[in-house]
Image: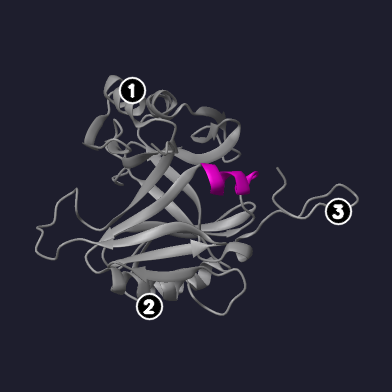
Amino acid sequence: MNHGTTHSSGATDAVSTRSVLGAPCWVSLSSRDLDATQDFYGAVLGWRWRTARLGDRFRTALADGVPVAGVAEMATAWQMAVAWTPYFAVANADEAVARVRERGGTVAVGPISFPPGRAALLADRNGARFGVWQGKLVTEWEAWRLAASTFTTLHTRDAFDAAIFYGEVLDWASDLPGCCEVEYAGGKVLLRSRGYVVARIESGSVETPPDSSVRPHWQVHFAVADVGPCVRAAGEYGGSVLTKGRREAVLRDPDGAQFTVTSRRQD
């Protein structure tokens, strides 16, 4: 599948972050044991793996040959929390990082160069971790957008306040070409890119005491053929099931990273 304009010479213009400003454009996972992570997600989601260009401690997950996620093995001395992290498309990573600082967020890493682009790992002012990416998007990105992660959800205390923060950092609902549209519906914030809902923001109860399951965080949702086999495989390969419904389940991998599987089935 082409993800740009094909010229008579056969060359293709790759999609860049400027064409989908503010939209989720990739997801990545930190891992303490790369082999165990590959085994777990291979069993649960059917992924295959290839070594990423960044080196032996990095892997790219493939679903039906399409790149869907990145995994990086952390040094054992690092004290970072293991989590799935969405990356959002920006025109300028340095400007995005400056905006995060100005609005009370924090910068964990970057911006740093990862040819063919620049990335930074950040947190909003409520502590939810996310990343930004500037540059060309992964090969077959259009297929990733349609088939890999169905969407990402921010669970936070004040959806309206969070929408203002991310809107100002990521140019949501601006007059820039390719920017995302924002819709407020039923107490939720929906983010649309090219007509598709690509992210949503939901508020939790302000009375809820902080704990690992309710504090502000981005949750990545993966589309699957059937939730049941994913749930069974998660238990067999050292993970756990946090919640389970007929069409959706929240799972935790052996390192503690949470993610959601959502059935493509319409019944």
Chain-order first, disc 2 or disc 3: 3
Residue holding disc 3:
7
x then y, percent, for residue 80: 31, 47
- The span picked out in magenta is 138-147
Q: Amino acid at mark 1?
A: Ala
Seen from this angle, which residue lies furthest top? 236
Residue holding disc 1:
233
- Seen at 33% across and 23% down, the residue is 233
Q: Amino acid at mark 3?
A: His
Could you tell me if residue 121 is visible in this image?
Answer: no
x then y, percent, for residue 74: 39, 39
Establish if 163 lies above or below 264: below
Residue 102 - label:
2
Q: At numbered mark 2, what does the secondary structure look like: helix, strand or loop?
A: helix
- Seen at 18% across and 48% down, the residue is 212
Q: Amino acid at mark 2?
A: Glu
Q: At numbered mark 1, what does the secondary structure look like: helix, strand or loop?
A: helix
Density class for disc 3 (Cα within 10 Å; few <14, some 14-19, many ≥20) is few
